[in-house]
Amino acid sequence: MSDVEGTVAIITGAARGQGAAEAALLAAHGAKVVLTDVLAEQGQATADEIGASALFIEQDVSSAEGWQEVVGTTLAAFGRVDVLVNNAAISRPLKLEDTEPETYDLLYRVNQLSVYLGMRAVLAPMKQQGDGSIINISSVAGLQGTNTLFAYGATKWAVRGMTMSAALELARYKIRVNTIFPGVIDTPILDENPDRMNEALVQTTPMRRLGQPTEIAEAVLFLASSRSSFVTGADFAIDGGMSI
């Protein structure tokens, strides 16, 4: 077992794909995991598959009240919050001129506002414990410009900035805040893109393949553990070389 045994982690967007892989790996190494998602049926099924160490909570990550419920339920069930993985995100393959304000606001609320709300919601228990690890999932689109993902890219750049500011602010409390930048990962979010776009993304990846959710989960496991105890404000690009 790794040194996350006995810790408690909240993972958003964990009903399927990358979030589900992150939750399963942490649980396999002895952590208690709280999975949240708007996909209630899939989320519960994923938690059931992980087993007794997993709890599912239906959550709209853009709701401040929803975050208070998630943290409160986690504390009631497990007594602490050691890790937060802000994984939930949505994408729309649209250029600036095709992005309506309503679409931009939706991506802002799910991809960016939720990260702020999540970090703020776990501060009190982490400060009381005197430690914690917050892992914000951005994207390779948060490291370089995009031609067809205007709103998505904007929100993912914002995640990087929030992480760096929070890392500086929270270091005094021994709360570490880091960012992971996945490349093109084989998850349902790719279903939003035209096939030709996904093919082009693979071709612009130097390793010429899709990443797997488990490859992101391994980085989450490292950042969740005390093995990364001197790591904060760091950028972890897991993108097959796309951002080089």
Image: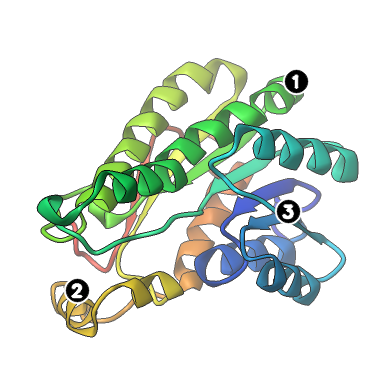
| Marks 2,1: beta carbons within 8 A | no
Element on which disc 3 rests: strand
Quadrant housing residue 40: bottom right
Image mark for residue 128: 1
Mark in front: 2 vs 1: 2
Image marks 3 and 1: residues in contact by CB distance under 8 Å: no
Local packing at callout 2 (Cα closer than 10 Å; few below 14, some 14-19, many 20+) is some
Which percent across, then down, holds residue 175? 58, 28
Closer to the eye: label 3 or 1: 3
Foreground: 183 or 60?
Answer: 60
Residue drawn at (41%, 40%), measured in percent from left and top?
A: 112
Mark 3: give few (<14), some (14-19) or many (20+) Cα within 10 Å. Answer: many
Disc 2 to disc 3: CB gap under 8 Å? no
Q: Is residue 202 left or right of residue 216?
A: left
Q: Amino acid at mark 3?
A: Val
Residue of label 3: 34
User: What residue sits 27% from the left and 43% below the top?
Assistant: 101
Query: Which mark sits nearer the N-terminus, 3 or 1?
Result: 3
Is residue 231 in sight in this rendering?
no
Amino acid carrying label 2: it is Leu
Q: How far is disc 3 from disc 1 in space, using C-alphas?
A: 20 Å
User: How crowded is the residue under tag 1: few (<14 C-alpha within 10 Å), some, or many (20+)?
Assistant: few
Q: What is the number of the mark on residue 201? A: 2
Q: Residue at x 67, y 73 (%)?
A: 42
